[in-house]
Image: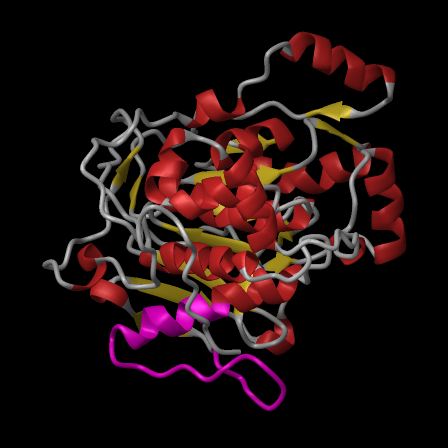
Amino acid sequence: MGREDVIIATSKPVSFVRPPQLLSTPQKQAPSFDMSQPQFFERKPSSLMQRKSPPPPFLSLADLTQTDDAEREEEACKTKAFVYLADITSSTDASRHSKIPPIIHQTSKSRCLTKLFAKVSKKWRDLDGYKYYLHDDNAVMKLLLSDQAAYDFPLLHQLVTANCLPHGTLKADIWRYLILWFYGGLYADIDSQPTALFNTTQPILTANDDGWFLVEQFHVLSQYVMAVSPRHPLMWYALHHALLKVAIQMDTGRVNAALVTGPHALHRAYQDFRRDAGANVDPQGPGYKPVWAGTFQGTNQRSITVVGKGEWEGQYVTREMMDLSLKKKQYAKMNMTSFRDDKDRRSGKSCLSAFFQYQENH
């Protein structure tokens, strides 16, 4: 699937160009994450548009995920016989150094999970040496509408405020790229679970990994689990491919997330990432197997490590711990919707039309 250029009428011209800092500056090594030091992230502009203003304050993960009344929410969970999941903000290995921060990110509508979903998530929460953050809907929207997101990705703020992202699946796709862009770490779907091979005496993620993915069943990079260092260019590309595709949708209520913001957006990003290092990656589709195991160089000599085989997708991470029927019943109890049912709410309005009307009224 090709990439389209999008030009949106604003006060400043916008076009799809690679940011100069990704291509024309000297190579920078991915930062090493030191759990004993304060947050180290260096903020620099990374946008399709030039800016002169300084970057806004950077939200900590605790700021993003904090709940106004955790005790009341926890009690409400208990009355429904649900399990309240709190963050795990201390690590069992405070001296650990790695390019990818040892942080696990998951998202759910709220912190109240059914006992079955809580049991599935527990495997991630119990991994040695990792912090764990659960991002509910409020935390997701807090990041999508944050000043730091608007600074790095102005189009994102415009699309969210114009209601071009009505589906939870679209928001979740874009959010996972965004959370990994800013903070790094490992993202995993809430219904996935690491296998015994994932965190043995020789962990599958190593200290030198700059990015880490599985080979998905369709022989593309896994999106249901992925790990990168902060400000990895692959996430920059994935965000922009997703946002530009959203911007040209003809009906904001009828969007196929897999094609627009999901695995296809990530694969188009991977093609750009590898092309910057002089490599051509086959398209995603029948007859192609464009991704295989290995370590691959991309933009500015940054890299990703890919493990596994598409035919053995569950070797390191079980993608779905429940069959579809059971999962939908569990989702319904938590007032959630499967991505398979979250794509057909016809609005009769294109995203550009929604954006224009919002701009006119504000």
Relative image position of residue 192 (x, y in whole percent): 66, 51
Q: Residue at x 19, y 64 (%)?
A: 23
Q: Residue at x 51, y 31 (%)?
A: 362
From the top left corner, tell me how far across and down residue 169 is, in percent.
66, 49
Q: Is residue 203 visible?
A: no
Up the image or down, 213 lies above or below 337; here it is: below
Residue found 18% across the figure and 53% down from its top: 29
User: Is 133 above or below relative to 66?
Assistant: below
154 with respect to 303 (left or right):
right
Is 216 left, or right, of 74 in this rendering? left
Compared with 252, 123 (above or below) is: above
Taking 27 as reference, is 239 left or right?
right
Task: Say whether residue 150 is visible.
Answer: yes
Q: Position of residue 152 (x, y in %)?
A: 33, 43
Q: Which residues are magenta?
A: 267-291
Q: Is residue 286 magenta-colored?
A: yes
Q: Is residue 200 above or below residue 95?
A: below
Query: Considering depth in this image, is 303 or 237 the residue closer to the camera?
Result: 237
